[in-house]
Amino acid sequence: MQILLVEDDQLLAEGVVKALKQAGFAVHWVSNGKAASTYVVAEVPNIVLLDLGLPDMDGLDVLRLIRHKKLPVQVMILTARDSLDAKVAGLDLGADDYLTKPFAREELLARLRVLERRLGSASSANIDIGPLHLNTATFQASLNGEELFLSRREYMLLKALVESAGVIQTKENLEAKLYSWGDEVASNAIEVHIHNLRKKLPDNFIRTVRGIGYVVDRA
Amino acid sequence: MTSIRLFLVVILIAIVTLANFFAALRGYMGSMDEADRLFNQNLLQQAELLNAFLPSYPYQPDSEKNTQNTLRQMVLTPPAKANNQQHLLEFQLIDDKGKVIARSTGIPETPVAELKPGFSLINFNTYRWNVLVHRATGQPLWIIVAERNDQRYRLAESMILQAVYPMVVAIPLIGLIIWLVVGLGLRPINWLAKEFRQREANDLSQIENNKMPDELQQLTQSANELLRRLEASFDREKRFSSDAAHELRTPIAALKIHCENLLQESVRPSESLLKLQQGIDRMSYLVEQILSLNRMSPDHFMGTFSRLNVTELLKNQVAEQSRALAERQHSIEFDGDECWIYGDRLALETLISNLLSNAIKYTPAGGRIAVGTWLRGEEVVLEIMDNGPGIDESAAERVFDRFYRLGGDRNNSAVQGCGLGLSIVRQVVDLHRARIKLTRSRFATGLLAMVIFPVNNVLDATTADNDKKGLDENV
C-alpha cells in the first residue's frame, strides 16, 4: 500500500511517516504542492494524505488535479483549519475522508484501513472482533471459525458496524448506507435486519443504544 | 438640551415670538405717530370750523372798562353727539387780552395754554390734553381746542391689538408646524440612527451616502471610514485567529503523534511517558476550547444560519463521543421528537458536544445519560441529563464564567477540563437567541441542562424538505 504524504511541517511529517511505517504502510513524503503534483502523476500512489495549508499552493488544487486526471487515488485531507466551508469544499471536490489536526494515531490508522479496504487490498481485508471474523475481500463472515450465512444487507450492516467498532452508528447513518448501496429502505428495515443478525451472533454482540442506534464494542 | 428637535422648536418659537413682539412694538409706535398726526389734523379742522362758525364777536377795542365791568362769558355745551364715546373736545375763545370770552363746559374759565400758536400737551381737569392754540382769522381772537390725550392711546391700542391678536393665536399653530418641519428635517438623522441600531454585531458594510443631506455626509463619511478600518482590523484578527489555530494545532499534532509512536514502540511504557501523553491531550483540549470560545464570540462569529435537524445533530454528537462513553462505561439513551431549528451547524455541534462531554466527564463511571429534543408548543427544547453529582443552585450562574471550575481550580484531577465549556455553550446559546437552564436532573441525582430555542427559531418539522418519518420507538 503506497501512501503519499503531503505536509509542509517537518516535525509532524516525520511523526506521521514513522507511525505509518510502524503500521506497515509504504510512505513517500513531499513538503509542497508542486512536488506533490508531479509525484502523483508520475508514480500514482494508493492513498494521498493531503495537508491543505501548503506553502506554495492550496492543497485543494492538488486534489483538483488528482480528480481532473481521474487518478485512482483515495484522498484523505489533513488540516488544522476547522472551518466547515473548507471541509465541505474538500469533500465536494472528491476527498474521501477528512481529518482535523491534532489527531490520534489510532484514528489516523483506522481511517487509512477503511480507505485501504475500499481499494480491496488483501492485507487489510480481515477484520477480527472477538469471535467474529470478517473478510471484506471475499464477503465472508465466520464465528469461531464456522461460516455465517448472511444476506447481502445483513452482511453490509455487520460490516458497517464492525468496521467502526466502538463507534455508535446512528440509525439514520445506517439507513443512509443502505440507500447508498442502492436499496430501497423501509422505515423498519434496519430493525428487521439487526434482529435477524442478532440471531446468528453471540448475545449482546450488537448493542442497542436506545433512541440512537447500534454499536459493536471493540474486543 | 438633549433633543435637537426640542432645542430647535423652542428656539424657533422664541425667535418668532420675539420678532412678533418687536413688530408689534414698532407698529404700536407707528400707529401712535399716525394717530397723533390724524388727531392733530382733526384738531386743526375743529379750530377752523369753530373759527368759521363763530358768531361775530362784538368787539370794542377801546371799551376796556365795559368789558372789565361786565363779565360776559359764553358757556357753550357741545351737542351730546359730539361727545359720545368720550370723544371729548373742549374749546376756549380768548381775546387778545387773555380773557376767555367763550368756552365749552368741560374746560376751566381761564386760558389753559399760553397764547402761542401750535400744539402742546397740557394737564387740566385731572386729564392730559392735546391742545391746539390757533389764531382766529378775521378777528382778534385766540381759539384753543383741547382733546383728551388718552383716546389717542385707546385708538392706537385697538389698532395694534387687531394686528397682534392673530399672531398670538397663531403661535401654537406655528409651533406645531415648526415641530413637524424640524422633525422632517431631522429624519435623515433618525434614519442613520436606525441604520446603526439595526446592525448585526458583525455587519461592517458601508452606509449608503448618496441619499444623505450635506450636513450628514461628513458624518457618514467618517463613519464609513471607521467601518472600513474596523473591517480591516477584524479581518486581520480573524485571519490571525485562523492562523493561530493552524500554528498551534500543527505542532500539537506533531507532539501527539511522536508521543504515540513512542508509546507504540515501548513494550512497557514508563509512567513519565503516560503523563506526557496526558499533558499533551490536556493542552490539545485547552487549545481547542480557547479556539472555540474565540470562534463563537459574537465579534468573530462567522457562521451561516440554515435549517438544521437538531435531533440528528444530537445523535451524531453522541456517536462522535462513543469512545469517551465506552471508556467511562456510561449508558446513554435518546428520547423525544424530531426537531428542526434555524441555526449554525458548527456552533450547535460545539454546544451539544460541550454539554455532552461535561455529562460524560462529571458523571462517575457506569452512569446514566439521557438526551432528547422535544417540541414544546412553539419551542424546541434540547435536553442533556445525567445522574452525576449535579450543580449546586448557588453555583448555577457562576459555571458560565470563563475558567470557572466547580469546587476550585483543581477540583478533580481525574477530570480533564479547563472551565471554558459552559462559557462556549453560553455564547452559542446567545448567538441563537436561546435560553439555557441548569436544573436538577430527573434521575435521583445529577444535572439537567436544557437549551430552549425560541419561537422564531423553530421550524415546523412538516415543512422540512427532509420528510423523514418520526423516530421509531423500537430502536
Image (spheres, coloured by chain):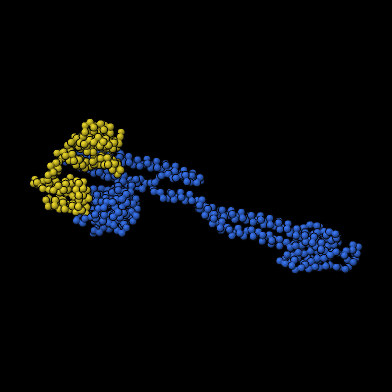
Chain colours: A yellow, B blue
Query: Residue visible at 28% across and 51% down?
Result: B465
Q: Find residue B249 and report its horizontal and vertical position in percent.
A: 28, 40
**In front here: B309 or B50?**
B50
Q: Find residue B48 and report its horizontal and vertical position in percent.
A: 80, 60
Q: Find residue B95 and report its horizontal and vertical position in percent.
A: 85, 62
Q: Which residue ends up furthest to the right in the rendered image?
A: B62
* For residue A147, above or below residue B157: above
Query: Residue visible at 32% across and 49% down?
Result: B306
User: In this orientation, does residue B176 appear?
Assistant: yes
Quarter residue B450 falls in: bottom left
Query: Residue visible at 14% across and 51% down?
Result: A197
**In front here: B348 or B443?**
B348
**In front here: B345 or B258?**
B345
User: In this orientation, does residue B327 appear?
Assistant: no
Query: Residue visible at 75% across and 62% down?
Result: B147
Q: Find residue B262 and report its horizontal and vertical position in percent.
A: 20, 38
